[in-house]
Amino acid sequence: MTDEENIKQHFRPDEAPLIAQVEDWLNTAADQYRPVLTDFLNPRQVYIAQTLTNRRDDVKMRANGGWEKAEMQRILFYPSYYEPQTADFELQLIEIDYPTKFTELHHRQILGTLIGSGLERSAFGDVLNEGMRWQVVVSQSLVDYLRQQVSQIGKIHVKLKQADLETIVTPQEDWEKMVATVSSMRLDVLVAAGFNYSRNRAKQLVEHGDVRVNWETEMRPDYPLVAHDLLSIRHAGRIRIDEIQGNTRKNKIRVAMSVVHA
């Protein structure tokens, strides 16, 4: 088995393009002796990048999403002698200014507006909330575009204002840690385990397009999940797959996960 085949057997087939892209970024940083900055990557993608980077001595990586617990982060690949600075990540915090006395915003509205403006999910980072304040982490190159394109979120008139990263809010999500014993790593099985649903209800949610895996709608109930996957279930909440702890004597799988209810 070649080294490349050995790598790919540890990841899902649909992750092969990302593996190739990460290898290209690593080679560029090594061959051209310069840092390479990515778009925003989700936790699973960051894990894959770190796994591949750890195999090399000539290139290192660092991830930054604007705050300590950021889910979406930009990665900087750089030669081992380089010392990364915060400015290298080219992050900009955007504060959403809106009439807080008369209306309220919701995460799904903001996310939908940003994607509806023509952006890919990888173009911006976390959407953050604390009380009535809403912020978004974006790349510096997108600021002018967003300010031109986004003047309303739903029916609410808004202004996007640049803010200092030091003023970023730190939302407190009530993640509950749990360990589930499951028959397989199928998507519907983990949704059922995380929210104590019946298997049939979980299967229907997936087939109806109500479940996203790493921000992408996934409608296959048998889609295989792995560590560091992040699930969003409409009207229910989110599940984070923290660790696959191995098999029980009855050949069930122990999965450590965190759950937050909507």
Image: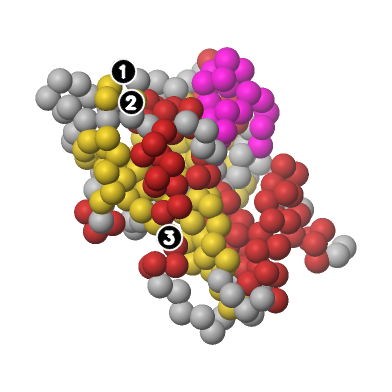
Q: Quadrant of the N terminus?
A: bottom right
Q: Secondary structure beneath disc 1? A: loop
Where does the image place residue 227, in percent across and percent down from the top left?
A: 56, 48
Instruction: Name the residue: 27% across, 25% down.
Output: 157
**Label 2, on which residue?**
152
User: Which is nearer the eye, 184 or 70?
Assistant: 70
Amino acid identity at mark 2:
Gln
**Label 1, on which residue?**
155
Location of residue 248 with respect to 157 vertically, above or below: below
Measure the alpha-carbon separation of dots 1 and 2: 6 Å
Amino acid identity at mark 3:
Glu
User: Which is nearer the eye, 214 or 140?
Assistant: 140
Location of residue 47 with respect to 182 vertically, above or below: below
Instruction: Pick whichever of labels 3 and 1 is earlier in the sequence.
Output: 3
Q: Is residue 76 left or right of residue 135?
A: right
Measure the alpha-carbon separation of dots 3 and 1: 31 Å
Q: Which mark is residue 90?
A: 3
Q: Is residue 104 left or right of residue 194?
A: left
Q: Secondary structure beneath disc 3? A: loop
The range drawn in magenta is: 204-224
Q: Is residue 92 magenta?
A: no
Instruction: Name the residue: 19% across, 33% down.
Output: 132
Q: Quadrant of the C terminus?
A: top left
Q: Is residue 205 magenta?
A: yes
User: Which is nearer the eye, 87 or 8?
Assistant: 87
Q: Kindly give the residue lying farthest to the bottom in the view shown.
A: 81
Measure the alpha-carbon separation of dots 2 and 3: 25 Å
Amino acid identity at mark 1:
Lys
Where does the image place residue 141, in percent across and percent down from the top left?
A: 45, 52
